[in-house]
Image (spheres, rainbow, N blue to C red):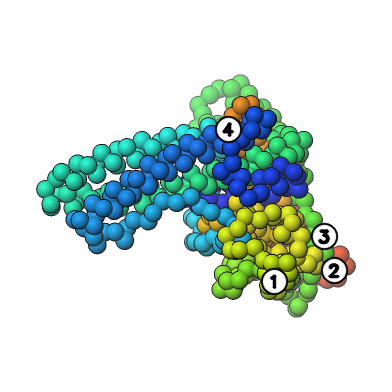
C-alpha cells in the first residue's frame, strides 16, 4: 500500500515461488529483459529505463542548483539532498517516522498501482524539472537581491522533488514485488480479486444507503414513492449484510503459530512472542520492540491485553558460518529466513519492500511508521490483511495491483491509521489451545468488529 508521503507496503500472501526468487536475485532491478520474459517484467524494465533517464535529469538540476547556491546563498545548501535510487540489501534499515493522521491515510475506495501509472508519475515530475530548470536560469540572470529570493524558493521547492523521486522509486519496487507475486499464484489472486470486488461493492452500498437515508428524511414525496424508496433501501441492506458476512468469513481467519505463548496474570492477558534478529543496530531493534508493544496493548473494562516481545540476538556469523554477506548486499529472502531457528518470529532485513515472509518481518529500505510495524506484527500473530489486494491483467503492460480497505478502524485493514481492537485479542484467545475459562474471561461477540455504518 503506497501513501503519497510514505511508502508502505505491508502485507503478504504467497511468496515461495521461482519468480519471487528471481525477483530477489542480485541485479534484477537493472537487468535487461529477454524476449521470452513475461510482460510485467518487460514493461517494468522499460519503466526502469524511463526512471533512470529522469533521475539523470534530476541529478543535473540538483548539481546546477547547488552551484548557483554556492555562489549566491551558500547558507541554503543545507536544504538540498542529492537524488539517489533507494538501495535494498542486507542490514539496510528503514527510518521509523511518525504515524500519519487518519485524515491523511484512511480511504474507502480502491486504489490501483501499475507500470503505466508509474510512467505517468515520472512524466509529471519530468515536466516539473523542466520548469524548475527554466526558473533556475532566470534566477541566474536576475539582480542579486531578486536572484537570492528566487534561489531560496527553488531550494525549498527542491524538497518536493526529492520526495517525489523517493515515491517513484517506491512505486517501482512495489510493482516489481507484487506483480511478480501475482504472476507466481494467479489462482489465489483470482480469488482475492473477487473478494476485492465484493469489498468495493459493499462500500458503494454503504455510501449509497447514507445518501438514501438523507433523501428519505428530507423527501416530500408521496406515499408510493416513500414505499418504493423503503423497498430499495431494504434490498440494499440485505445485500450489504450478505457481503459483510462473506467478507468477514474470508478476512477474519487467524492461524496462531505455536511459539506464541498465552499467559494469564490476574486481570491481564499476555501474549509472549520470542523474536530472533540479526539486525546489528540494537537501538533500532529496541525502537521496533517499543513501537509494537505500545500499539498491541489494550485496556477494555476490567481486562487488559498486551504482547511481550522477547528479543534474541543472533549474530551474522552464526547465520553465515561460511562468511556473512556484506552490508547492503542483495540476498535471497527465502534462503536467508531459513537460516534462523523456527521456534520464534524473525526480524531481519534485505527486502525491496517491508513485508512478512512466513514467520519473519523482512524490512525494506523505505520509511515505516510504528503502526505499520504493528500491522506487520499482526501477521506474525496469525492475522491476514484486512485490506484486500486484487489485480487486473493489463496484457502488455503487466498487472494493475488493486487495494481496498475493508474496515478503516482495524490496523490489519488500515496499517497507517487503524487500531488494535479488542476483537484481535479475543480472536487470539479463541484460537489458543488449553486456555482456562473463568467468569472474568472476555465474552466473545459477533458484534466485536466496528461496522462501517457506525
Q: Position of residue 318 (x, y in %)?
A: 73, 71
Which residue is pictured at 47% across the width and 40% down the height?
51
Which residue is pictured at 75% across the width and 78% down the height?
266
- Classify mark 3: residues with Cα within 10 Å, few (<14), some (14-19) or many (20+): some
- Classify mark 4: residues with Cα within 10 Å, few (<14), some (14-19) or many (20+): some
Q: Position of residue 79 (x, y in %)?
A: 32, 58
Viewer-side label of 2, 4: 4
Labels 4 and 1 touching (C-beta < 8 A): no
Which mark sits nearer the N-terminus, 2 or 4? 4
Q: CA distance from mark 4 to mark 1?
A: 39 Å
- Classify mark 2: residues with Cα within 10 Å, few (<14), some (14-19) or many (20+): few
Where, by quadrant of the figure, is residue 235 drawn?
top right
Q: Position of residue 72 (x, y in %)?
A: 19, 55
Residue bearing mark 3: 431
Q: Is residue 151 above or below residue 227?
A: below
Q: CA distance from mark 1 to mark 3?
A: 37 Å
Element under disc 2 = loop
Residue bearing mark 2: 435
Residue bearing mark 4: 43
Element under disc 3 = helix
Which mark sits nearer the N-terminus, 2 or 1? 1
Which residue is pictured at 24% across the width and 55% down the height?
69
Task: Please indicate whether residue 206 sits to the left or right of residue 148 in the image.
Answer: right
Q: CA distance from mark 2 to mark 1?
A: 39 Å
Amino acid at each position: 500500500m503506497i501513501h503519497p508521503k510514505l511508502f508502505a507496503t505491508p502485507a503478504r500472501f504467497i511468496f515461495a515461488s521461482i519468480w519471487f526468487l528471481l525477483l530477489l536475485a542480485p541485479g534484477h532491478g537493472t537487468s535487461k529483459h529477454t524476449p521470452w520474459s513475461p510482460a510485467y517484467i518487460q514493461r517494468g524494465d522499460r519503466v526502469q529505463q524511463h526512471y533512470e533517464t529522469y533521475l539523470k535529469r534530476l541529478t543535473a538540476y540538483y548539481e546546477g542548483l547547488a552551484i548557483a547556491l554556492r555562489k549566491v546563498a551558500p547558507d541554503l545548501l543545507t536544504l538540498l539532498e542529492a537524488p539517489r535510487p533507494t538501495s535494498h540489501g542486507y542490514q539496510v534499515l528503514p527510518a521509523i517516522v511518525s504515524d500519519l493522521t487518519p485524515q491523511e491515510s484512511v480511504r474507502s475506495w480502491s486504489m490501483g498501482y501499475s507500470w503505466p501509472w508509474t510512467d505517468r508519475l515520472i512524466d509529471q515530475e519530468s515536466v516539473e524539472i523542466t520548469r524548475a530548470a527554466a526558473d533556475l536560469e532566470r534566477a541566474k540572470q536576475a539582480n542579486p537581491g531578486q536572484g537570492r529570493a528566487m534561489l531560496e524558493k527553488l531550494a525549498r521547492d527542491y524538497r518536493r522533488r526529492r520526495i517525489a523521486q523517493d515515491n517513484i522509486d517506491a512505486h517501482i519496487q512495489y510493482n516489481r514485488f507484487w506483480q511478480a507475486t501475482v504472476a507466481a499464484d494467479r489462482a489465489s489472486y483470482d480469488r482475492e480479486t473477487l473478494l476485492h470486488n465484493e469489498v468495493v461493492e459493499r462500500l458503494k452500498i454503504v455510501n449509497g444507503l447514507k445518501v438514501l437515508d438523507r433523501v428519505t428524511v428530507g423527501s416530500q414525496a408521496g406515499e408510493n414513492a416513500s414505499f418504493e424508496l423503503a423497498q430499495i433501501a431494504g434490498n440494499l441492506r440485505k445485500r450489504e449484510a450478505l457481503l459483510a458476512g462473506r467478507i468477514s468469513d474470508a478476512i477474519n481467519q487467524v492461524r496462531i503459530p505455536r511459539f506464541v505463548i498465552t499467559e494469564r496474570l490476574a486481570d491481564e492477558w499476555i501474549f509472549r512472542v520470542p523474536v530472533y534478529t540479526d539486525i546489528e543496530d540494537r537501538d533500532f531493534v529496541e525502537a521496533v520492540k517499543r513501537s509494537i508493544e505500545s500499539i498491541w496493548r489494550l485496556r477494555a473494562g476490567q481486562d487488559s491485553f498486551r504482547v511481550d516481545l522477547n528479543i534474541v540476538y543472533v549474530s551474522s556469523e552464526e547465520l553465515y558460518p561460511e562468511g556473512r554477506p556484506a552490508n547492503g548486499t542483495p540476498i535471497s529472502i527465502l534462503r536467508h529466513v531459513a537460516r534462523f531457528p523456527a521456534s520464534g518470529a524473525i526480524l531481519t532485513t534485505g527486502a525491496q519492500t517491508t513485508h512478512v515472509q512466513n514467520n519473519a518481518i523482512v524490512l525494506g529500505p523505505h520509511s515505516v511508521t510504528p503502526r505499520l510495524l504493528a500491522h506487520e506484527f499482526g501477521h506474525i500473530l496469525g492475522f491476514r490483511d484486512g485490506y484486500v489486494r486484487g489485480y487486473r491483467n493489463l496484457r502488455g503492460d503487466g498487472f494493475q495491483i488493486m487495494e481496498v480497505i475493508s474496515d478503516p478502524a482495524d490496523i490489519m485493514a488500515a496499517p497507517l491509521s487503524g487500531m488494535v481492537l479488542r476483537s484481535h485479542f479475543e480472536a487470539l484467545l479463541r484460537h489458543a489451545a488449553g486456555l482456562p475459562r473463568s467468569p472474568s474471561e472476555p465474552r466473545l461477540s459477533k458484534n466485536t468488529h466496528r461496522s462501517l455504518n457506525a
